[in-house]
Amino acid sequence: MNDSGLLTKKSVRRSWYFYDWANSAFSTTVISLFIGPYLTSVAESGADASGMISLWGLDMRPGSLYPYAISFSVFMQVFLLPIVGGIADRIKSRNGLLAVFAYIGSISTICLYFVKDGRYALGAFLLIVANISFGAALVVANSYIPDLASPDQRDAVSSRGWASGYAGGGLLLILNIILYAGYETFGVTQAEAVRISMMSAGIWWALFTIITVRGLRSLNRPVGAVGSEALTVGFKELKSTLREVRKYPETLKFLIAYLFYNDGIQTVIAISGTYAILELKLTEISLVIAILIVQVMALTGALLLAKLSNRIGAKKVILLTLVIWTLMVIVTYALPAGQQNPYLVIAAGIGFVLGGSQALSRSLYSQVIPRSREAQYFSFYEISERGTSWLGTLAFGIVFGLTGSYRQSVLLIIAFFVIGGLLLLRVNIRQAIKESGNPQPKVV
């Protein structure tokens, strides 16, 4: 490749990194911190005399609205993302498809600013649309990895993307925490600070997506489906992929392993705040500090573990992170109540392996899927990540119901890491790459 081509490749990669930078604001500011408590409070303000709300004919308690909305959005993704993947694999303007979902999601997030005064139905609708669009856009974005890097470069490229995401999401999160903590200084109410913060995440998502969409134009196909034809192609591609998926047994084994260990990761993310406050008796400020530490350490871990993967391979590094995940859960189980500093150390450890395990899983998966069907297979990956992430939290809730102890429930999470790790050990990555018809990297 000449110098001009190398510079072009680097610039295209940078534009792709910016999408992780852009959309992570939605994950950190909206999902991780603000939308759950805020939407619940809006629903409570709109409850009737019996303390119930009614949404689209379904009566529920205000506290159920947020988990129901998230669950419904994930349920819809199971059906929609494979179709999106099929379209992305055959559409002429792939960056245009990315833009469509990114802007539907970001505009819906911006409109969360108008959720107030009992408008919980509007809030639930916008959250559902934003979360579905978030997942759909990720399917398209992840499908670019094989176009951006050779097999030996993918761990580094994927990890830089994740690091960019943690940097961007963390930076906006810090600014929004400053606004939320000092809302009186800025002349707004606490509720207004939350609404402004969520709106800022949508604006951030929209603005930086422009860089990605413009930068990825050079990777559009010279020919491909356009208009209504793209939707028809999406369904045809899905049918074809479902028929052929059995040709790639090692890839399926990896996807099942990922389903288990990622469910452990997602459960830790989902319950860590509740565990910190209700079981460890820590303050909300401790939780905020922990979130910030996780952002910083995840960025660091993604970059450092990518370098380690160049030496020993992504599979071994992922297995190493699963061992560390397990140890962190065990230490958390044994941690006495009221111990803030040890909890923050655990947060740092979790953050370090969080970035690496996610980034390297994405790059390793890109090695074991067939060319020209990347988006279709990444739709299954996204479903494994998001569509099954309720299994761990459900199991956590059942154990809590039986034992009345969050500590006993935490121990169950270990099973997801152990099962996922054992399944991953049995995956022959070299064979999976061969079955998919891809070139072999030096180390896996």
Image (cartoon, rainbow, N blue to C red):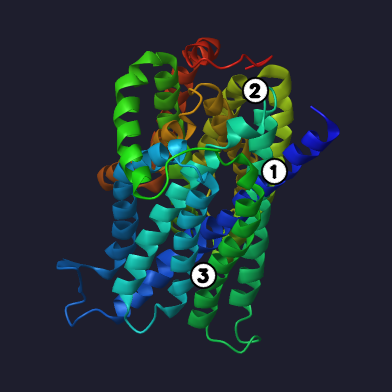
Q: Position of residue 188 (x, y in %)?
A: 57, 87
Q: Are marks 1 and 2 in contact (CB under 8 Å)?
A: no
Disc marking residue 12? 1
What is the crowding at mark 2: few (fewer than 14 residues within 10 Å), some, or many (at least 20)?
A: many
The percent coordinates of residue 1 (x first, y second) are 79, 27
Q: For residue 360, say whether it is visible.
A: yes
Within 10 angstroms of label 3, few (less than 14), some, or many (20 or more) residues?
Answer: many
Q: Going from the N terminus, do you reach mark 1 or mark 2 first?
A: 1
Labels 2 and 3: the sequence-earlier one: 2
The kind of residue on which mark 2 rests is Pro
Tag nearer the camera, 1 or 2: 1
Give above or below for 372 relative to 195: above
The quadrant of the rendering that contains the C terminus is top right
Q: Do the residues labelled 3 and 1 touch (CB within 8 Å)?
A: no
Q: Nearer the viewer, mark 2 or mark 3?
A: 2
Marker disc for residue 198:
3
| Residue 354 figure quarter | top right
The residue that disc 2 covers is 151
Residue depicted at x 46% and y 38%: 224
Q: In this view, does 233 lie above or below 123?
A: above
Q: Is residue 393 visible?
A: no
Q: Measure the alpha-carbon separation of dots 2 and 3.
A: 38 Å
Q: Is mark 3 on a helix, strand or loop?
A: helix
Q: Which of marks 3 and 1 is in front?
A: 1
Is 162 left, or right, of 5 in this rendering?
A: left
What's the CA distance linking mark 3 and mark 1? 29 Å
Q: N-terminal of the two: label 3 or label 1?
A: 1
In this rendering, would 349 be left or right of 81?
Answer: right
